[in-house]
Image (cartoon, grey):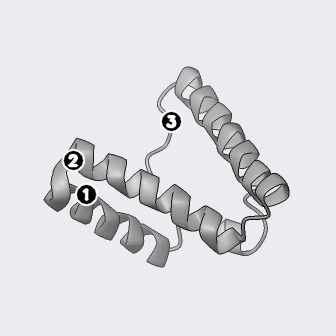
Amino acid sequence: MERPRTPADAMQRVLCDKLIESCAATMFQKLDAPVEVIVDRFVAYTFAQLVQIEGRVGAARMLRDLAQQIEDGALDAYERGEGN
């Protein structure tokens, strides 16, 4: 996953993460949505946007690249509980 290039990029990511976390908490706490539904809705929205921007082929390529990064250990710290 690409690292932020500037402090402004890093701050934008932090703010986006906080907004996503707040949305997920609202869906879980106020709507009683199960985690599987929350993840499904975020993923569906994300993939639809990705296809709009990159096209079907580009989106598929990016998703394969992300899957490879995960397999290579990009999220290992989160799996161990160290990424938060």
Which SS class for mark 1?
Answer: helix
**N-term mark: 3 or 2:** 3
Q: Does residue 20 sit above or below 37 in this rendering?
A: above
Question: Is residue 75 visible in the rendered structure shown here?
Answer: no
Query: Which residue is the site of mark 1?
Result: 59
The residue shown at (63%, 62%) is 38
Image mark for residue 4: 3
Residue 17: image quadrant is: top right
Image location (x, y in percent) of residue 16: 61, 36
Of badges 1 and 3, the one in the foreground is: 1
Cα separation, mark 1 vs mark 2, equals 6 Å
Q: Are marks 3 and 2 in contact (CB under 8 Å)?
A: no
Residue 67 horizontal/vertical position (percent):
40, 72
Asked if the residue at tag 2 contacts the one at tag 1, i.e. Cβ–Cβ closer than 8 Å, the answer is yes
Residue carrying label 2: 54
* Camera-nearest residue between 51 and 66: 51
Helix, strand or loop at mark 2: helix
Viewer-nearest of discs 3 and 2: 2
- Tell me which numbered mark, 1 or 2, is placed earlier along the sequence: 2
Relative side of 64 to 21, left or right: left
Q: Secondary structure at mark 3?
A: loop
Please report whichever mark, 1 or 3, sits nearer to the chain's N-terminal start: 3
Q: Is residue 42 left or right of residue 64?
A: right
Q: Residue reaching furthest right?
A: 29
Q: Quadrant of residue 79?
A: bottom right
